[in-house]
RNA sequence: GGGGCCGUAGCUCAAUUGGUUAGAGUACCGGACUGUCGAUCCGGUGGUUGAGGGUUCGAGCCCCUUCGGCCUCGCCA
C-alpha cells in the first residue's frame, strides 16, 4: 500500500503516529514560513503542513504543488495549535506534519475544481466527467446508488430470490420502444436487439421453475431523452410464480419501507395507499399523480351546459369536459401576464384551446373577462363546486377529456412547484392499479397494449375482451413516487390460448407472433405457472431518494439529450473494414 | 419532427437604446507573508463574444444559417 490511512480517517487518537496519506491537492495556502495543503480523497480532507522542520527541499516541493496534483505525504499526526482547529472538517482536530512528500503525478490546470462553490456548466462536467465525479455531491449520489443496490440485493436474498443474468444480445420484438440494434457478423444481414427489459426471459425463467427471480438489469430504449430518461438505464427487475398482484405489491411495499427507513429515516405505513387508474385520471388527470399536495381536478361540465359562454356550453354538450383546478390563494401571485404564460403553456404544450380563469374576490365573487357570460347564480355554483375562497385563482380548461387531463395535470404540477405546495424533502409513495388493458392507437388505427402484450386481464374482465376491449382492465400496478412512475408491473398471461387471443386483438397475426416470440408461446404449453412481476427504475429511485432533479446526476457516465457521450465522443464512426465485415452500408441520405 | 432558454477570459458571470480600448470575481504567472482553512495583500498574463453569413457609419446586442448544452410537446409496450 502506498498509504497507511485515508484522508478522512485521522482523529485525535492518532496523534503521535507516523502516517502516509495519498490524495489530490485540494487547496494550498502558502504563508512562506508555513504552507498548508488540504489533501483530498473520497473519504475526506486532511490538512498537511509544510514547515521549516520539514526540510528546505520538502518545503520547496510543497510550494510548487497545485490543484489536483496527486501526492503522498509521510509525517506525524499532530494536534492543531489551540484555536486553529477546524470544526467544519471531520479531521479538523489534527494535521499531518510533513516529513516527506512524493509527487506521484502532476495535473494540468483543471477546467473545474472539485471543491468549487459554483457548479460548472453541465457540458463541461460531462466532458471532464472524471473531474466532476471528484465532487462530493457526485460521490454522495454514487454512494447512495450503491447503498440502494446493496439494500435491494440483501432484501431479495432474504426473501429467497435468485439473481439470474439475462442476455444483452437478444432479438427484436414488435411493439414497445425503438430498439438499439447490433448487426451480426456471423449471420450477415441480421441484427440483435439490446433488451428494452428482460421481460420475456424472466417469464421463461418462471416456466423453468425459478419462482423468485431478481436482477439489476441494464435496459436500452432508443427514444428521445428527458430529464428523467436516458437511452441506457437500469431496472430492478423481478418476477414471481404462484402469486397475485397483491403479493408483488406487498414485496415492493416491504422494499420501499426499508429504503425509506434506512436511507431517509422515514417510517412508512404499510400497505402503501392504492388508487385505480380511473380515479387517478379523474382526480389528477395523470396516471402517476403527484400526491404530495392536493389541488385536485374539479369537473364542472354539468354547470358549463347552463352557461351562455359558448366555449363551455358547446364543449360540454358535444361530449367534451370542462374541468379546472383551484390554486388556493394564488390570485395575487399571477398577474394578467402570468396567466398569459399559463395560457401559452396549456395551449402550446398540450394543445388546449385556451385557459379560462377567475380570480375570487370577497363574498366568493368571481372576476374574469369572461364572467359576463355567466349568470351570477351560475358563477356562485361554480365557486361552490370548486371550493373557492377569497384570494383563490380558478383555472379551467374546456376540451376533449384527454386534453383536459394533460393540460390540467401540467398546470397542477407547475403550480405545485411554483407555489411551493410541498416541502423539499417530502416523499409520497403510492400504487396506481387497474390500468386499461388497451389504448386506441390513432396513428396505427388499432388497439395497442397499454403495458405490454403479456399482461393478464382481470379475471372478471375476461368476457369483455372480445367485444369491449376498451373496458377491459389489466392486472397492472405502477409504483408512483412524487409524481414519477418509479416502476410498473403486471400479472402475466400464463395460458397460451389467452395469449394468442390478446395478440390477435393487438393485430399481431399468428405468423408474426410465432416468428417473434414463438418460443414464449411454445414455453407456455410446457407447464407455465401463474406468474407476475415488476420492474423499478433504479436511476429514478436514486434521483428521488437523493432529492435530485435529473437522472444524469445519478449515473456515472450519462448521455446528453442528443444521446452522445461528451467524454468519449460516442457514438462515433467506425472503420470501413468493420462495416464490411458486418455487411453494413451507410446510405448517403 | 415542433416550441422555448442558453453559449462572452481556463471557470462563474457582467456589459444602458446598437456606440469609445468588452469588465468583475476566481483560476493562472510573479512578488510579500510562520497558523491558514474559499488565506490575505500587491502586480501581471489572459478574449476570433460557439462558428459562418447579413443589416448598419458602427454588432457581444438586430436578422438568417449552423454547431453545442438544457427544458419541453410528440415519442417512451
Image (spheres, helix red, strand yellow):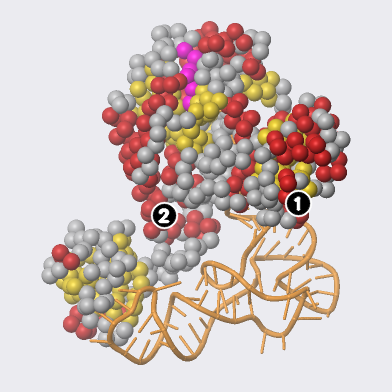
Kindly indicate the quadrant of the structure image that contains residue A207: top left
Provide the secondary structure element on which disc 2 rests: helix
In percent of the image, x 82 and y 44: which residue is there? A371
Q: Describe residue B52's horizontal placement relative to residue A225 as left or right.
A: right
Locate the N terminus of chain A by quadrant: bottom left
Image coords of residue A279 (percent x, y): 59, 27
Tell me the subunit letter for badge 1. Answer: A
Label at residue A340: 1
User: Which one is in front, A538 or A255?
Assistant: A255
Image coords of residue A505 (percent x, y): 63, 14
In percent of the image, x 76 and y 28: which residue is there? A302
In percent of the image, x 81 and y 29: which residue is there? A305
Residue A542 in sight here: yes
Label at residue A182: none
Q: Describe residue A523's horizontal placement relative to residue A226 as left or right.
A: left
Residue A130 in sight here: no
Q: Describe residue B7's horizontal placement relative to residue A306 as left or right.
A: left
Image coords of residue A179 (percent x, y): 56, 32
Q: Is residue A537 magenta?
A: no
The correct choice, above or below, for A402 with respect to B10 in the image is: above
The correct choice, above or below, for A503 with respect to A557 in the image is: above
Real-space Cα separation, disc 1 to disc 2, in angstroms: 39 Å
In percent of the image, x 59 and y 38: which residue is there? A223
Comes first in the chain, label 1 or label 2:
2
Please provide the residue range marked out in magenta: A489-494
Callout 1 and callout 2 share a chain: yes
- The reply to whether dot 1 and dot 2 touch (C-beta < 8 Å) is no
Tell me the subunit letter for badge 2. Answer: A
Q: Is residue A490 magenta?
A: yes
| Number of numbered markers | 2
Residue that badge 2 annotates: A138
Provide the secondary structure element on which disc 1 rests: helix
Amino acid at each position: 500500500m502506498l498509504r497507511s490511512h485515508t484522508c478522512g480517517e485521522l482523529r485525535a487518537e492518532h496523534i503521535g503516529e507516523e502516517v502516509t496519506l495519498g490524495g489530490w491537492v485540494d487547496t494550498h495556502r502558502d504563508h512562506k514560513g508555513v504552507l498548508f495543503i488540504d489533501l483530498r480523497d473520497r473519504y475526506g480532507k486532511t490538512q498537511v503542513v509544510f514547515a521549516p522542520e520539514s526540510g528546505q527541499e520538502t518545503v520547496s516541493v510543497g510550494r510548487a504543488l497545485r490543484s489536483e496534483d496527486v501526492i503522498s505525504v509521510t509525517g506525524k499526526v499532530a494536534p492543531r495549535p489551540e484555536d486553529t482547529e477546524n470544526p467544519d472538517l471531520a479531521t479538523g482536530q489534527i494535521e499531518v506534519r510533513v516529513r516527506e512528500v512524493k509527487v506521484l503525478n502532476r495535473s494540468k490546470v483543471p477546467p473545474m475544481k472539485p471543491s468549487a462553490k459554483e457548479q460548472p456548466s453541465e457540458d463541461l462536467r460531462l466532458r471532464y466527467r472524471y473531474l466532476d465525479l471528484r465532487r462530493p455531491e457526485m460521490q454522495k449520489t454514487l454512494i447512495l446508488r450503491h447503498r440502494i443496490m446493496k439494500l435491494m440485493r440483501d432484501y431479495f436474498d432474504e426473501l429467497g430470490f435468485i439473481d439470474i443474468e439475462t442476455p444483452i444480445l437478444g432479438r427484436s420484438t414488435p411493439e414497445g420502444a425503438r430498439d438499439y440494434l447490433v448487426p451480426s457478423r456471423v449471420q450477415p444481414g441480421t441484427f440483435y436487439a439490446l433488451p428494452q427489459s428482460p421481460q420475456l426471459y424472466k417469464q421463461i425463467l418462471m416456466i423453468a421453475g425459478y419462482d423468485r427471480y431478481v436482477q439489476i438489469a441494464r435496459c436500452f430504449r432508443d427514444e428521445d431523452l428527458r430529464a428523467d430518461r436516458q437511452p441506457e438505464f437500469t431496472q430492478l427487475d423481478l418476477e414471481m410464480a404462484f402469486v397475485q398482484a397483491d403479493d408483488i405489491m406487498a414485496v415492493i411495499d416491504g422494499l420501499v419501507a426499508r429504503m425509506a427507513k434506512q436511507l431517509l429515516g422515514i417510517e412508512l405505513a404499510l400497505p402503501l395507499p392504492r388508487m385505480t387508474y380511473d380515479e387517478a385520471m379523474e382526480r389528477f388527470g395523470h396516471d402517476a399523480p403527484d400526491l404530495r399536495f392536493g389541488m385536485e381536478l374539479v369537473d364542472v361540465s354539468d354547470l358549463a351546459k347552463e352557461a351562455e359562454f359558448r366555449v363551455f356550453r358547446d364543449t360540454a354538450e358535444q361530449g367534451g369536459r370542462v374541468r379546472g383546478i383551484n390554486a388556493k390563494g394564488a390570485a395575487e401571485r399571477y398577474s394578467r401576464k402570468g396567466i398569459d404564460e399559463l395560457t401559452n403553456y396549456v395551449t402550446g404544450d398540450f394543445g388546449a384551446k385556451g385557459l379560462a380563469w377567475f380570480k375570487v374576490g370577497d363574498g366568493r365573487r368571481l372576476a374574469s373577462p369572461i364572467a359576463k357570460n355567466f349568470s351570477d347564480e351560475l358563477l356562485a355554483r361554480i365557486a361552490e363546486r370548486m371550493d373557492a375562497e377569497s384570494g383563490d385563482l380558478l383555472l379551467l380548461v374546456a376540451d376533449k377529456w384527454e386534453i383536459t387531463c394533460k393540460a390540467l395535470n401540467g398546470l397542477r404540477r407547475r403550480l405545485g412547484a411554483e407555489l411551493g405546495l410541498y416541502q423539499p424533502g417530502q416523499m409520497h409513495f403510492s400504487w396506481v392499479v387497474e390500468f386499461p388493458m388497451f389504448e386506441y392507437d390513432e396513428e396505427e388505427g388499432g388497439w395497442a397494449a397499454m403495458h405490454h402484450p403479456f399482461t393478464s386481464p382481470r379475471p372478471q374482465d375476461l368476457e369483455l375482451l372480445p367485444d369491449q376491449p376498451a373496458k377491459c382492465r389489466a392486472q397492472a400496478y405502477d409504483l408512483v413516487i412524487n409524481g414519477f412512475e418509479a416502476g410498473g408491473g403486471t400479472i402475466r398471461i400464463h395460458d397460451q390460448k389467452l395469449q394468442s387471443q390478446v395478440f390477435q386483438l393487438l393485430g399481431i397475426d399468428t405468423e408474426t407472433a410465432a416468428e417473434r416470440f414463438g418460443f414464449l408461446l411454445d414455453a407456455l404449453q410446457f407447464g407455465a405457472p401463474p406468474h407476475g412481476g415488476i420492474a423499478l427504475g433504479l436511476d429514478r429511485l436514486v434521483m428521488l431518494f437523493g432529492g435530485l432533479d435529473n437522472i444524469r446526476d445519478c449515473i456515472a457516465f450519462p448521455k446528453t439529450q442528443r444521446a452522445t457521450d461528451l467524454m468519449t465522443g460516442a457514438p462515433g464512426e467506425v472503420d470501413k473494414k468493420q462495416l464490411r465485415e458486418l455487411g453494413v452500408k451507410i446510405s448517403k441520405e
